Amino acid sequence: MTRITFIEADGTTIEAMAKPGMSVMQVAVNAGIAAIAAECGGACACGTCHCYVAEDWADKITPAGEDEADMLDFVIDPTATSRLSCQIAVTPEMDGLVIHIPSSQT
Amino acid sequence: MHAPAFDPLSESFARNPYAAYAQLRDLTEPFYYADVDSWMLTKAADVEAVALNKTMLRSRDHLLSEADRKAEQRKMNWHDMPHHERFVQTNLLESEGETHARLRKLVFREFTAAMIARQRATIQAFVDHLLDELNACDTFDFVEDFAAHVPGHIIGRVIGVPDADCPQLRIWSEQVVRFFNVGCDDTDKQVAEQATKEFYEYLLTLVEARRKAPAEDLMSRMVEHRDAGRMTEDELVATTMLILMAGHGSTIDVLGSGMHALLRFPDQHQKLREDPGLINLAVQEMFRFESPLPYFHRFATEETEVGGRVFPAGTRFGLLYGAANRDPARFDNADRFDVTRSPNRHIAFGGGTHFCLGNHLARLDMDVIFTTLNQRFACIELVREPIYKPGLSVRGPVSLDIAVRRR
């Protein structure tokens, strides 16, 4: 199991355990994080599972593919570490990953 | 357990489809509905799994031989209607893979939350204008006198259709869309074909107008895409038609059923009045509670297990979003309308790559409308119980007579 820490916009911290192969979006949804709307369910088609990967983790996970990069052009308040959480597959190496959650996706 | 009687054209189904959906949901396996040769899925987990399964396709035309495609078309009675085949049976929604991704990308920008937010002032001005015109009325039909005018006007603005033409576009849209409901006949077919032809001829003149004089609208940008070879002229016409059709009916339906829900659950309406900041949650709950497009389909392209049964490639599944959104396994008190429900992971906008392109626009229309109604009217009451449209493909009241008291 891989431990992921989500920090919501108001500072609330939620720790969740993830199985390899799950997406970070699925882990967040299962943990009840409402601000990860993930409306399309993980098809890279809506841009509502936007998250910020903690800076010290940004270089350690597989970078965004072309479809994800296109979609990131449309999210609210993007930064250099913006990702779509549905496109990040959990691996054992991600144990301890920290993800910051935007206040809203729309 | 015996298969229950399932009659989506019946009066009782129009009155309360959720009782029938609950019966289907209680079956141990999906229900085969012979009328549309489909296995109906009603559990949220099954519907979501199929919507998100990349081997399940909305359209499989590109996988069929020409002869099989023609046979399939004839089975659905979608043959011998050249304009409908060219612009309605072939479009962004009915495409898959590279074509779908390319077309969706070309128009996605216009429908993002940030771009749609720019329409707020336009929507507000139009809603205020309509309500000013109704100022002398203490009772009116919320659907036909008010709600029906808003979505088409706003989507028309986004595309770049002159305001005066929007009512005609609504007529064509409804005539084309009606043909997709269960129980339609050859008369509906002729009407749908004629409407598509006229719609096409109208759009050709608009394309030419924008080519000569580009404006800040979606049509002008699509003409640019067309002239740069990123989409064909047929794709441009079909995409515009799809956006116009999708932008009309379903939002009108959910405005009507959403208003009805507020009147059926006055404690929830009161909560929204006391805290207008709940509007986003309230609108999402309206989509969950009375999903305006309750039925879509997918084809299996390989053998797949769904809902505890293995189905062969080629199986057609009915995704009953309206049933999934009332599944007690997913939603607490699923039959209760709750404007504070959060998270509210409904599937009214579909899922996967075909996820509703216009969801932000529909939600913004509703946000402005219900917020404005609550500001203007101290009291809104139901005059009589509405009758809902028959059938499986759409859900919304035909009319909704309300009495209002101004502040």
Image (tube, coloured by chain):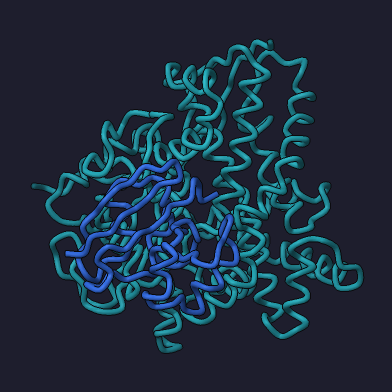
Chain colours: A blue, B cyan
Q: Residue at x 41, y 43 (%)?
A: A11
Judge by depth and name the residue closer to the eye, B316 or B348.
B348
- The single residue placed furthest to the right in the displayed view is B212
Q: Which residue is drawn at 68% across and 82% down?
A: B230
Q: In this view, does B28 lie to the left or right of B173?
A: left
User: Is residue B96 positioned above or below B154 on the image?
Assistant: below
Quarter occupied by residue B316: bottom left
User: Is residue A47 positioned above or below B164 on the image?
Assistant: below
x, y (%) of residue B362? 58, 46
- The single residue placed furthest to the left in the displayed view is B1
x, y (%) of residue B184? 48, 54
Number of callouts: 0
Q: In this view, does B320 lie to the left or right of B350?
A: left
The answer to whether residue B182 is seen in the rendering is no
Quarter occupied by residue B205: bottom right
Quadrant of image for the C terminus of chain B: top right
x, y (%) of residue B176? 60, 58
- The single residue placed furthest to the front in the displayed view is A56
Q: Residue at x 51, y 51 (%)?
A: A105
User: Is residue B40 positioned above or below B119 on the image?
Assistant: below
x, y (%) of residue B399? 57, 30
Q: Is residue B8 left or right of residue B195?
A: left
Judge by depth and name the residue closer to the eye, A93 or B108.
A93
Q: In this view, does B64 lie to the left or right of B283?
A: left
The answer to whether residue B70 is seen in the rendering is yes
